[in-house]
Image (spheres, rainbow, N blue to C red):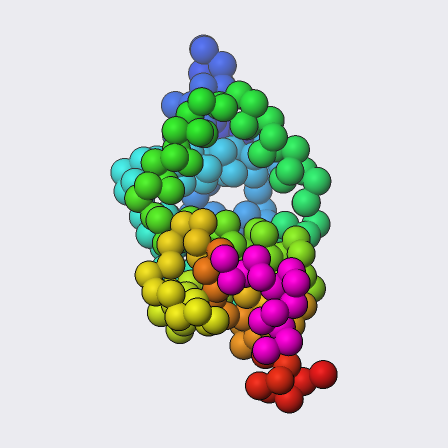
Amino acid sequence: MLGRFYGKSKRGNTLLTIVKRGIKIWGMDKDILTPEDLLIYKKVKNFKQKNWRKTKPGYNRKYSDTWKINHSDKWKEYMQNYREKHKEQIRANRKAYYQLHKNDTKKYATEWHRQNPDKAEAINRVNSANKKYKGKLTAEMVRKIIIREKRTCHWCGKTNLHGRDLTLEHLERINDPEKIVLACFSCNAKRIIGEHHNQYSKIEGNS
């Protein structure tokens, strides 16, 4: 339709020509446009959106972050479903990225652990527990357990547990926060011979 009035410039269908023609199309009903004019309409729309993003950097990020906070349940569900559907692809992408940026990744991890010791501590305990026991723990659950138990060994009362000396003691073989306490490394090792498990069974009346 509009192609009869607005032909190509001498340089061809340049961006300037697209914008000039698109301005004429912008306020019109898309249903009456020809395929050629509709294509120009879409190009101009995309062009305007890109320019808008450049003039307001960070706006989309701010809006996105706000939406995620206000709809945290939907966002978590979406990301969980996405990870389940693309598990192999995500794993392959991570391996490929690590191989290309091995040194940078190690430096970043070291710096992150130094700046976030509590989070790193919780994540390390989560990975170990989820491999050994049924159920799924999260880093946030472990952090709450550490706060609840006040970094104190459930058995000997040793306080201020950190690093290798802080271990999760599963009173039952399941990742249930209500059945998990803290233990020092020495007391946790004694669990192998059943000392503390038998003691817990007598106290709680479990068999």
Q: Is residue 2 in view from this perspective?
A: no
Relative image position of residue 166 (x, y in whole percent): 44, 57
Q: Quadrant of the N terminus?
A: top right
Q: Position of residue 130 (x, y in %)?
A: 62, 57
Q: Residue at x 58, y 61 (%)?
A: 190
Image: magenta residue range: 186-199
Instruction: Answer with left or right where residue 69 lies relative to residue 125.
Output: left
Q: Where residue 36 appears, x then y in whole percent? A: 59, 32
Query: Front-most of 192 and 152?
Result: 192
| Front residue of this view, candidates 52 and 199 | 199
Judge left or right: residue 194 versus residue 145.
right
In the rendered view, tell whether residue 169 sits above or below residue 39.
Answer: below
Q: Is residue 167 above or below residue 21?
A: below
- Residue at image location 70% in from the left, 40% down from the top: 88
Q: Residue furthest left?
A: 55
Is residue 196 covered in magenta?
Answer: yes
Give the x, y percent position of residue 129: 60, 57
User: Disc count in the image?
Assistant: 0
Q: Magenta includes 202?
A: no
Determine the image quadrant of residue 147.
bottom left
Left or right position of 183 against 84: left
**Among all residues in the image, which is located at the extreme top?**
10
Dominant secondary structure, magenta: helix
Q: Nearer the viewer, residue 49 or 70?
A: 70
